[in-house]
Image (cartoon, helix red, strand yellow):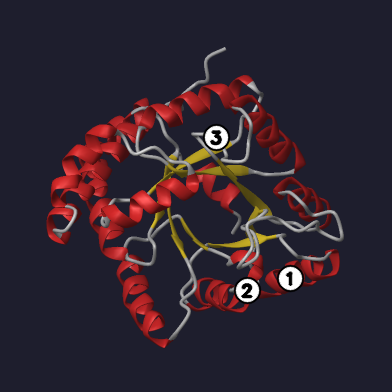
Amino acid sequence: MKITEIFEKQKRTFSFEFFPPKDYLTAVKFGINAGQLMKLDPSFVTVTYGAGGSTQENTFNLVDMFHNDLGFVCMAHYTCVNATREKIAYDMRTLQDMGIENVMLLRGDPPKGSDSFPENPDGFNYGSDLIRFVNENYDFCIGAGAYPEKHLEAQSEEEDLINLRIKVDAGADFLTTQMFFDNKYYWDFINKAGQKGIRCRIIPGIIPITNFKNIKKFARITGATIPEEIGKKMEPYKDDPKEIYKIGLELAIDQCRDLLDNGAPGIHFYTLNKSRAAVDLYDNLSKDFKEVKNRFEKSFSPHIPEK
């Protein structure tokens, strides 16, 4: 099933992102975590793709397992760094043969050990190049990335939004955002995207803060801002995993409730292959949904961008 078909049936979707295990031990841990998430019946799951395609085989194997063995609607991430036209075509056919109908198309990270992007021999230098090629040649539902606080390489918000519009015009069916911790960034972004004529579904990407040190590192890499009040709450407990988990979960619950109450079209959970926080977060949100389901279904309306 294509994710766009799910959108027609579900006003809000709840999805989970995994990355392929790299060794036996992490594979065992992953199996336990994935098993925990199965009971949540997510709208769909996604599987990431390493820098320069470094985890391609594992990515495809995991996508195959999720889709064909476990019965999830699954989306395969795919990047074009160092990828030739021939390789991309072969890989798309491979995914089609597996029965996969959804792909998240990205430029990707620089090759391992490099800080820069090599010139692609076949012209796939940006995510939009990959999206256009796949859209013109294959029948996939296509997802793409969005950055509420601006892509780090963009010189301005305006430039970033122009590039985003190029991706949507090239064939992206929906967008998933990079993580953020202050919802005002998401709503400001939604309004500005609307002003650029971007009307597709934009799903907020959320990560519960269960390890403050790691999240601070991820935030620096992605350009996400950690609000001062979150730092003040967590810094005193940075060496207390249990308290950090408790605080992080409470913050994520409040953030997701606020997003959903104000019309966000669902949540995409970045699990980091550690499902306990995602399970606890989703369980808490699910209780809310059961209690106010009728109100949500009757009064739900998407956030309308300002003109």
Mark 1 / mark 2, whichever is N-terminal: 2
For this view, does 88 lie left or right of residue 116? right
Q: Which mark identifies residue 43?
A: none
Residue 57 x %, y %: 62, 78
Mark 3 or 1: in front is 3
Q: Residues within 10 Å of mark 2 (few under 14, many from 20)?
A: many
Quadrant of residue 101 within the rendered picture: bottom right
Q: CA distance from mark 3 to mark 1?
A: 30 Å
- Front residue (pair 143, 295): 143
**Sequence-earlier tag: 3 or 2:** 2
Residue type at the position of mark 2: Gln
Q: Label 3 sits on what residue type?
A: Lys
Determine the secondary structure under disc 2: helix
Q: Which residue is mark 2?
A: 56
Q: Pinpoint residue 130: horizontal percent, then vertical percent.
A: 75, 53
Q: Residue furthest top?
A: 307
Residue at image x 26%, y 63%?
Answer: 276
Which quarter of the image is occupied by the C terminus? top right
Residue 38: % across, % down: 36, 68
Which quarter of the rendered picture does the N terminus lie within? bottom right
- Residue underneath mark 1: 91
**What residue is pinned by disc 3?**
150
Q: Residue at x 17, y 40 (%)?
A: 233
Q: Bin the neighbour count of mark 1 within 10 Å (Cα to Cα): few under 14, some 14-19, many 20 and up.
A: some
Q: Is residue 29 left or right of residue 21?
A: left
Q: CA distance from mark 1 to mark 2?
A: 9 Å
Q: Nearer the viewer, mark 1 or mark 2?
A: 2
Q: Is residue 212 above or below residue 84?
A: above
